Image (cartoon, rainbow, N blue to C red):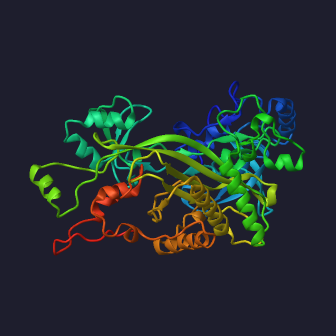
């Protein structure tokens, strides 16, 4: 809902930059954002227009217009409210918003209120539109507030996602801290070692008495910031403008995409984002990239070059507690009789340490046939447990996360899976060459409301595969790897571990779903026998 003009909106703001963050003080309501802080002009934006404003004011006085004001300026993109009832023009009365561009802004001679001449996108020019019918919008997306889905939260003890409808516990403080789901918090609160376990998780001193219960409404709203073009003076969201962000110098001029295309403007080097080709290339990234290039050529697919880089490569340790005894065995009976408690949680005292190498692999492509912005469309996180790792994780690889967005462009279309399969098969070939024996993939699509890596998706991108379809997708990839003699055989968890005698024979990986699920995979059935593990 649009508001009355802010008292300070008619004056140019001195000092400060041309970038603006929609903070809580002027971002929660459409009215505050539209009628107040969003119209503030920044240093260096329009300073040379003062003479034009004075001349325009003198001209307007001859036509009964008092003065031109800096509330909404010529060139600003706006939405104009059209009420559903003739007797009401207020935005509170319902109706619809239609996009347009401000042609002229001035004060009415009758009541001193700011009014605008607006060229609607339909081609009709609206004269003397009242300010309370207008709200400023982004010149690209034509919306005033661009809200983002908040990033997913995970319990830092059990690694389960904390859904938006659940309450959770978080360490107090302005910056926040360790987050726990309700179950883990209750379990820790009932023990005498809560502070020690939390300190091991956070690698610093943490006290459970400092935790507060919170709900989804307590999380801050994630909204996009604004930037103004120094040529046409239109306002754009950072995302819509492909603006670099917080680390940009305040005195650096910014030009929107339209001005760069039509007016010959160029961005200064401080605002130019370095291409992915500038990232360090490794032997692995070169192998994946060259393999993909050959695969696309063999398939007759034409596409802008894809750049693949290993952007993270660090040594880590997974500390995993010893597994519980099999249900129905003498060890399990003894543990239950003595009241012993075992768990499969990271950070538990007495667990074994498994060293591994964590890697993050990203794939990039420049849109619009290579002339548009560069987009990261594929990401994969892997854990490599080498020969120095104790059993059962020795010489095993875990693909912990794999995610993509539908932005790969090719001719003909429909070859995204060709790209993803090529990267996976080439990576499996690389691990085989290094001496790894097994690769583990947990096949489970994200639950509704959850994301793995690319969490800020548009509605068109939020259609994950069903579980069975995802299984078939991975099987198709493994069949290709098998045909190339990269994979000898593959199977489910049931195939690999049927007949095991101890849970200690099952490899467990850091942050892995197995680590949480294994205790429930082996359980007594109705006759008291141990059932075979079920797996995806």
Say how many tags the image has. Answer: 0
- Relative to 217, is 474 on the left or the right? right
Rendering coords of residue 79 (x, y %): 68, 54
Rendering coords of residue 380 (x, y %): 57, 54
**Which residue in the rendered view is the most extreme toward the top?**
15
On the question of residue 492 being in view, the answer is: yes
| Location of residue 12 with respect to 308 vertically, above or below | above
- Along the viewing direction, whichever of 339 and 135 lies nearer the viewer: 339
- Along the viewing direction, whichever of 505 and 262 lies nearer the viewer: 505
Picture quarter containing residue 334? Answer: bottom left
Picture quarter containing residue 238? Answer: top right
Rendering coords of residue 506 (x, y %): 35, 58
| Location of residue 506 with respect to 221 vertically, above or below | below
**Which residue in the rendered view is the most extreme toward the right?**
264
On the question of residue 1 being in view, the answer is: no
- Along the viewing direction, whichever of 40 and 119 lies nearer the viewer: 40
| Location of residue 528 with respect to 171 vertically, above or below | below
- Along the viewing direction, whichever of 388 and 113 lies nearer the viewer: 388
- Relative to 425, is 291 on the left or the right? right
| Location of residue 343 with respect to 301 vertically, above or below | above
Q: Quadrant of the C terminus?
A: bottom left
Rendering coords of residue 73 (x, y %): 76, 42
């Amino acid at each position: 809902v649009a508001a009355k003009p802010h008292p300070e909106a008619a004056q140019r703001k001195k000092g400060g930059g041309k970038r603006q963050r929609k903070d809580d003080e002027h971002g929660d309501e459409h009215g505050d954002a539209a009628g107040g802080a969003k119209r503030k002009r920044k240093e260096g934006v329009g300073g040379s227009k003062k003479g034009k404003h004075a001349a325009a004011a003198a001209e307007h006085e001859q036509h009964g217009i008092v003065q031109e004001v800096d509330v909404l300026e010529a060139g600003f993109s706006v939405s104009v409210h059209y009420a559903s009832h003739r007797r009401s023009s207020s935005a509170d009365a319902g109706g619809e918003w239609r996009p347009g561009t401000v042609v002229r802004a001035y004060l009415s001679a009758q009541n001193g209120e700011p009014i605008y001449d607006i060229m609607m996108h339909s081609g009709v020019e609206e004269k003397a539109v009242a300010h309370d019918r207008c709200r400023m919008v982004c010149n690209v997306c034509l919306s005033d507030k661009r809200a983002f889905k908040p990033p997913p939260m995970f319990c830092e003890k059990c690694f389960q996602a904390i859904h938006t409808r659940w309450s959770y516990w978080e360490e107090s403080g302005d910056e926040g801290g360790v987050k726990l789901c309700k179950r883990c918090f209750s379990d820790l609160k009932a023990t005498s070692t809560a502070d020690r376990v939390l300190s091991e998780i956070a690698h610093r001193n943490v006290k459970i008495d400092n935790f507060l219960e919170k709900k989804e409404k307590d999380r801050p709203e994630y909204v996009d910031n604004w930037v103004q073009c120094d040529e046409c003076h239109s306002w754009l969201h950072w995302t819509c403008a492909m603006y670099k962000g917080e680390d940009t110098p305040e005195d650096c001029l910014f030009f929107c995409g339209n001005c760069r295309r039509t007016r010959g403007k160029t961005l200064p080097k401080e605002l130019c984002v370095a291409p992915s080709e500038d990232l360090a290339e490794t032997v692995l990234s070169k192998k994946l990239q060259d393999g993909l290039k050959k695969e696309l050529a063999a398939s007759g697919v034409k596409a802008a070059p894809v750049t693949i880089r290993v952007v993270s490569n660090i040594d880590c340790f997974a500390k995993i507690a010893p597994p519980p005894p099999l249900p129905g065995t003498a060890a399990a009976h003894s543990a239950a009789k003595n009241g012993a408690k075992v768990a499969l949680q990271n950070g538990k005292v007495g667990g074994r340490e498994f060293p591994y190498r964590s890697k993050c692999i990203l794939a990039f492509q420049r849109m619009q046939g290579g002339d548009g912005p560069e987009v990261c469309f594929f990401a994969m996180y892997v854990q490599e447990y080498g020969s120095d790792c104790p059993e059962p994780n020795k010489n095993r690889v875990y693909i912990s996360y794999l995610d993509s967005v539908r932005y790969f462009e090719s001719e003909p279309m429909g070859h995204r899976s060709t790209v993803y399969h090529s990267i996976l098969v080439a990576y499996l070939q690389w691990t085989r060459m290094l001496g790894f024996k097994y690769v583990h993939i947990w096949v489970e699509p994200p639950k509704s409301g959850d994301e793995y890596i690319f969490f800020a998706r548009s509605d068109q991108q939020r259609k994950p595969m069903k579980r069975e379809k995802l299984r078939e997708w991975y099987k198709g990839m493994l069949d290709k790897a098998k045909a190339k003699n990269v994979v000898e055989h593959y199977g489910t968890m049931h195939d690999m571990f049927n007949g095991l005698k101890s849970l200690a024979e099952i490899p467990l990986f850091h942050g892995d779903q197995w680590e949480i699920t294994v205790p429930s995979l082996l359980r007594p059935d109705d006759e008291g026998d141990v059932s075979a593990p079920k797996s995806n």
